[in-house]
Every structure is written in C-alpha cells, then in structure tokens.
Image (cartoon, rainbow, N blue to C red):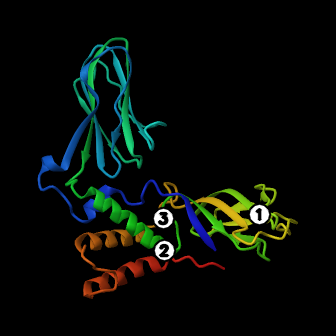
Amino acid sequence: MDKKVITAVTTEPITLAEAKTHIRLTSGTFAGDVNTQQSITPGNHEVAVHTGTAIDVLGYITIVNLNSGTCAGTVTAKIQESDDNVSWQDFASFTAVTAANDNVVQEIEYTGGKQYIRAVATVATASCAFSVDVVTKTGDTTEDDLISALITAAREYCEGYTGRALATQTLEAYPKCFPRKNEIEIPYPPLQSVTSVKYIDSGGTETTMTADTDYIVDADSNVGRIVLPYAKTWPTATLYTVNPIKIRYVAGYYASNPIPKMIKQAMLLLIGHWYESREAVLIGQGTMSKKIEFAVDALLSMYKVRFF
C-alpha cells in the first residue's frame, strides 16, 4: 500500500542532548558546556503578572531557578511549556515566596519535551525582588546542525527497516481497492487516529466516509485498522483508476506510548557510527560497519511490522 507524508515529524524521538551525551560531545570546559538565560530579569517587581521571555530548550538538559530577594508581598511563579511559542501549558510551580522564605534559590529541572519554556510570576500585596534563570547544559554547539540531521537520518532508517512511525506525523495511505475482508490495516503503526477516509468513483466524484457509521477505528491493535461496523459493507462503486482510496491518519509513538528503548538504542548506535565515520562509510562496509549493522538489525528485528 502506497503512502506519503502529509505533516512531517516536528519532535524527534531522540533529543539533541541525548545524542550528544551518547557521543560524549562536550566543549571541554564547564563554562562552555553550560548556558544561562534570563526569562524574568532581576529587579524589584511590582504587583502584577510578569510573563517571562520564552527560551528554546529543545534537546538540552535544563533547570530553572527562581532567585528571590527581599519580598514584602508574595510571589507565585510557575514554568510553562510550548511547542510553538504561542500556545502554553503549565509544567510545574515553585513554592510561593513570602517574607518568611525570601532570599533563597529554588530549582526545578525541566523534563518535558517541548521546544520552549518560560516563567510566569504573579506578585501580590507588595513588590518583591526576584528573577528567573533558565540554565541549559549545551556542550559544544558547533556541530548541532550535523547531529540534528543524523538524528533525523537514524529515525528514517529505523522507520524504513521496521515499517513503524517512530514519532508523531500525519500520513496518507492509498489502498488500490476495498478489500474482501472487513478491515483495512493502516501502514506505519502505531496508529494514533484517523483523520478521514475518502474514495473517488470512476466519474471522479470524491466521497468522504463517516467515522463510526461507515467504519470503526481500531488504534489499539499492534497494527491499526479501520473496520466495518456490524452489517455494513464497503462501497460498491466502480473506483477511479489512480489512488481511488485515501486514508489520512496520525501515526507514531508519543508521550503516553513511548518509542521502545531497543529502537532508541539502535538509533543511538547509528548516530554515533555516522558521527565518527563521515567519509563514505556505509552500513555493511568494513569490520566495524558489519558489527554496527548486526547490532542495529538485532535491536530492530523484533519490531518489524508484519501485515496479515
């Protein structure tokens, strides 16, 4: 069954920080490995809601510090996260600062997977002195673009080998016809959801099928399916000659259904191998490449998708 990518992966299953840790890439100095940025700048902040600057932390080990000075009122501060620097969700809150516990530093590690974080602080009753810093462990950043490209290449290789979508993406599949059986298996699991099922008849008229009436989505099976409801049949119209059926769907591992660790390890082996061997070294060439090929294939083989 043919398929194409409609919306590509935006968040890779391996972060830049994970890849750099795996290949032991550091700058060689503590100062070079750590970067500090201010979300809320130091100062005596008046009674109001103070929304901090967004900081790009994707791929980095990150901590957020609330540095409080003298506080005559109260400060309630929290960390928010976002994929697009537009829509924000709360991640974690600091302990409220009052005169009884001011002049201390509170630290929270950011363990989410979003690209941006920021601080939002509410000052009540009277002004308070404080700031919020975002500290990232970046290591040597000169080859970040290369490593990011290797992460994507490793994911695409493992997707091709296993027949699985390893991160959230929108795909479209093109069955050649409706099957005799009562189900259509959806390629590149795990299936998250089905956006639409459409078919075109021989006259060029496109019809959108109705979910739960014309088909039922099974996203729980190892290979996701659309299944006919009881006593229903597939459309009997004569179909168009080219890609008559279009199934648009969202697939890929995500936070509550994370990518298997063996697949991640295979990706890390590929990233490390490609990082160290940049000049015309392919999997399968040379003794070391053979060892890498065997290790990667061994890790991935049990996750190869088998359609029935």
Q: Residues within 10 Å of mark 2 (few under 14, many from 20)?
A: few
- Judge left or right: residue 26 versus residue 266: left
Mark whose residue sits in front, 2 or 1: 1
State the separation of the CA atoms marked 1 and 3.
Answer: 30 Å
From the image, tell me which residue sits under label 2. 160
Question: Which one is in front, 139 or 262?
Answer: 139
- Residue 68: x and y in percent read 25, 25
Earlier in the chain: of badge 1 and badge 3, it is 3
Determine whether, in the image, residue 5 is placed left or right of residue 53: right
Mark 3 or 2: the one toward you: 2
As helix, strand or loop, the secondary structure at mark 2 comes to helix
Q: Which residue is mark 1?
A: 200
Disc number for residue 188 = none
| Residue 102 appears in the picture as rendered | no
Is residue 76 placed above or below 280 in the rendered structure? above
Report the Cα–Cα distance between label 3 and label 2: 10 Å
Q: If you read the primary sequence from the N terminus, does the residue marked by circle 3 or circle 2 appear first? A: 2
Amino acid, disc 1: Ile
Q: Residues within 10 Å of mark 3 (few under 14, many from 20)?
A: many
Amino acid under label 2?
Gly
Q: Quadrant of the C terminus?
A: bottom right
Q: Quadrant of residue 275?
A: bottom left
Foreground: disc 1 or disc 3: 1
Residue bearing the label numbered 3:
166
Name the side, left or right, on which 105 lies relative to 11.
left
Dot 1: element: strand
What residue do we see at 38% from left, 60% from top? 14
Judging depth in this view, the residue of 117 and 122 nearest the camera is 117
Residue 294 percent location from the top left of the image: 36, 84
Q: Residue at x 34, y 32 (%)?
A: 53
**Mark 1 Cα shell of 10 Å, populated few (<14), some (14-19), many (≥20):** many
Q: Is residue 92 above or below residue 181?
A: above
